[in-house]
Amino acid sequence: MRILIVIALAFAFGALAAHADVPGAQPRNQTVLVNGNFIRLGDLFPDAGDKAQVVVAYAPAPGARVVYDVKSLAAVARTNGLAWQPQSWFDRVVIERPAITVGDAEITAAVRAELAKRHLDAKAEIELATRGMMLQLPADAPIDLALQSFTFDDRSGQFSGALVLPAADGKQTITVAGRVYRTVDVPTLSRRVATGETISRDDLDWQPARLETLARNVILDPAKIAGMEARHPLPADQPLRVGDVRAPLIVAKGSLVTMVVQSPTMTLTAKGRAMDSGALGESVKIQNIQSKIVIEGEVISPGTVRVAAATVTPVNF
């Protein structure tokens, strides 16, 4: 069967040469870019002469391609009276139509431009109702990504509009809809922090977060994080909550501390043992070394606890 096909093609090429009235070129593994809606004879055969503008077929869609193999080329040449001989059985011409790709990023930019006219925060997060769109538009057509009939509900964040774009046969209208989420920059950790480790300013990073999804106890002020200790292991790139950090402990449980009682007329001190660990300003329980009575005081400096004068008696101090 293959031998018969080869003989038939050889006969066709011989007949083609005998009846040709226009010299032709010999394309071989060529790729030709075509703008417009049609493939012309000159796209397949560069030396088609005065027949170069003859329309052969419709062009592929923008961003697509069509392949003319040796048999297809022979048929086109024969139909149009071109004297064309292949250099090999693998000769081919690939017709590609250039395209401009419009996807989520370009559509989101068009939406953001409309929102900017309404003075919306430039950092707001835009979520398209239909994501993953990849529109292949003719590269030779003027493209305006301005949205028409744009509407925006400030309360719900919902928006909609229309993109009017060029198409192979005229224009196409693409409906664009979605929602806008207002965001705020939240301090996060740039690395994992272990329990008890002190967080420095250099450990802080910033991440945008949807305002409506933030819990009330999320820390937004970096001054309330830097210099604090981690209460438990903290991951990177996550908002921190009030309960995640604490002031550094300056009184350790079981350590000896100085209990101080102050009044306008005197200052008394005594030794005690801390029953709790505590940071500056926190309350801890202290056991008097001599009386063994436990009282409560406020940590005022490393190893020092202030006891309220009203709670002190000769027995417990």
Image (cartoon, grey):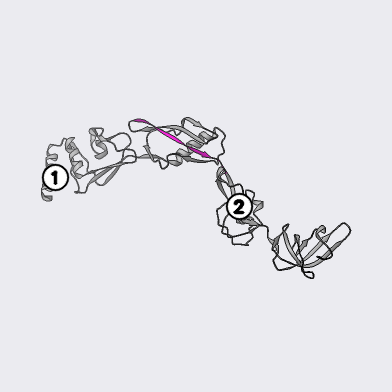
Which tag, 1 or 2, sits closer to the chain's start?
A: 1
Horizontal side of 317 relative to 84 (left or right) equals right
Q: Secondary structure at mark 1?
A: helix
Label disc, if present, on residue 82 of the rendered structure:
none
- Region of the chain picked out in magenta, as a range: 169-183
Residue 2 appears left or right of 313: left
Location of residue 257 (image quadrant): bottom right
User: Residue 108's spot in the image, x, y percent?
Assistant: 47, 39
Q: Is residue 127 above or below residue 237?
A: above
- Secondary structure state at the residue bearing disc 2: loop
Find disc 1 in the rendering and name its residue: 9
The image shows residue 286, relative to residue 167, as above or below, that is below
Q: Nearer the viewer, residue 191 or 74?
A: 191
> At 62% across and 54% down in the image, what residue appears?
243
Distance from Cα at disc 1 to Cα at disc 2: 78 Å
Mark 2, Cα crowd under 10 Å, few <14 / some 14-19 / many 20+, is some
In front: label 1 or label 2: 2
Three-letter residue code for mark 1: Leu
- Residue 241 — which label? 2
Residue drawn at (13%, 48%) of the image: 6
Decide whether residue 182 is among the magenta residues. yes
